[in-house]
Image: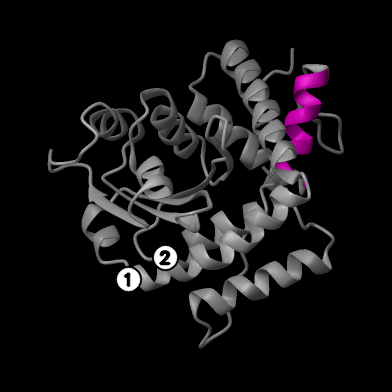
């Protein structure tokens, strides 16, 4: 993931037009591809009421579903549990109803194994998934996770559907250009970097991801580039004075 931060929408912008502006900016910076997918999920968190985290699931015939962009490590875990358990809103949205929304804390979801685990281990209280692509040719889903079930329940469906419509175009373009494989590879490298931090400093996956994201913002370095350096060298970067740039954590 790139660690790019969504810009503040101009006054009067709708979520859809603001997102379009951000994607145009990404094109202008030459960051089309996996970085554009990161713009999409970051914009969802910034602009969709009740959205704590967002992710994109890609589905393709003969392939296992995969998360190609997300705003947090726990969103990736929530997605991954769906793939492993073969149940959950992103799978339902991709294969059935175009929009799936549920409170995860009322005990009435159709996902008896997935929902309790997401509440207990990820802290989410509500979820909304919107199909990307068409029923005949599904591309995946836009997944919106919230820690406030009521706030997410109040999110207008048309806002989520507008995001999904533009996201479908970007995801389809990324797939044609072969960028989805790159996006999955990025997720793998970031996971490797998290694993190094977890083992070395005895921290959780969430804390390791938060450390990487913080360093990315602090050093103005893309999250993937930072993770790749750590995965390849076993070292976190140092600041201009040569001291560890990791909040005092030792580097060896």
Q: Which residue is mark 1?
A: 156
- Relative to 227, is 200 above or below? above
Mark sitting on residue 51: none
Residue under the point 26% across and 34% down: 115
Which of these two is toward me, 125 or 215?
125
Query: In this image, 8 relative to 240: left or right?
Result: left
Taking the magenta stretch, the answer to whether it contains residue 224 is yes
Contact between marks 2 and 1 (CB within 8 A): the answer is: yes
Q: Quadrant of the C terminus?
A: top right
Which of these two is toward me, 138 or 206?
138
Residue under the point 73% across and 72% down: 24
Mark sitting on residue 160: 2
Residue 220 visible, this orientation? yes
Q: In which quarter of the view is residue 154 placed? A: bottom left
Main SS of residues in magenta: helix
What segment is highlighted magenta in the picture?
A: 221-232
Query: In this image, 147 relative to 234: left or right?
Result: left
Residue 245 visible, this orientation? no
How crowded is the residue under tag 2: few (<14 C-alpha within 10 Å), some, or many (20+)? many
Q: Position of residue 99 (x, y in %)?
A: 34, 57
């Amino acid at each position: 993931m790139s660690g790019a931060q969504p810009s503040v929408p101009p006054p009067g912008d709708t979520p859809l037009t603001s997102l379009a502006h951000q994607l145009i900016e990404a094109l202008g910076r030459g960051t089309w591809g996996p970085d554009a997918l990161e713009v999409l999920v970051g914009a969802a968190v910034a602009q969709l009421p009740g959205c704590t985290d967002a992710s994109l699931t890609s589905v393709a015939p003969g392939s296992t579903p995969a998360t190609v962009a997300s705003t947090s490590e726990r969103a990736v875990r929530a997605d991954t549990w769906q793939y492993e358990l073969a149940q959950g809103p992103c799978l339902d949205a991709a294969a059935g109803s175009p929009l799936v929304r549920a409170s995860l804390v009322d005990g009435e979801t159709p996902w008896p194994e997935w929902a309790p685990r997401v509440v207990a281990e990820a802290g989410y209280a509500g979820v909304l998934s919107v199909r990307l692509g068409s029923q005949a040719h599904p591309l995946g889903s836009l997944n919106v996770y919230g820690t406030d079930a009521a706030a997410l329940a109040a999110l207008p469906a048309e806002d989520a559907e507008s995001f999904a419509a533009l996201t479908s175009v970007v995801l389809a373009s990324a797939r044609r250009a072969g960028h989805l494989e790159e996006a999955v590879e990025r997720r793998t490298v970031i996971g490797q970097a998290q694993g190094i931090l977890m083992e070395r400093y005895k921290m959780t996956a969430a804390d390791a991801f938060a450390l990487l994201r913080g360093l990315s913002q602090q050093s103005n370095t893309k999250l993937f580039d930072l993770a790749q350096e750590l995965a390849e060298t076993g070292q976190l970067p140092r600041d201009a004075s040569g001291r560890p740039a990791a909040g005092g954590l030792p580097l060896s």
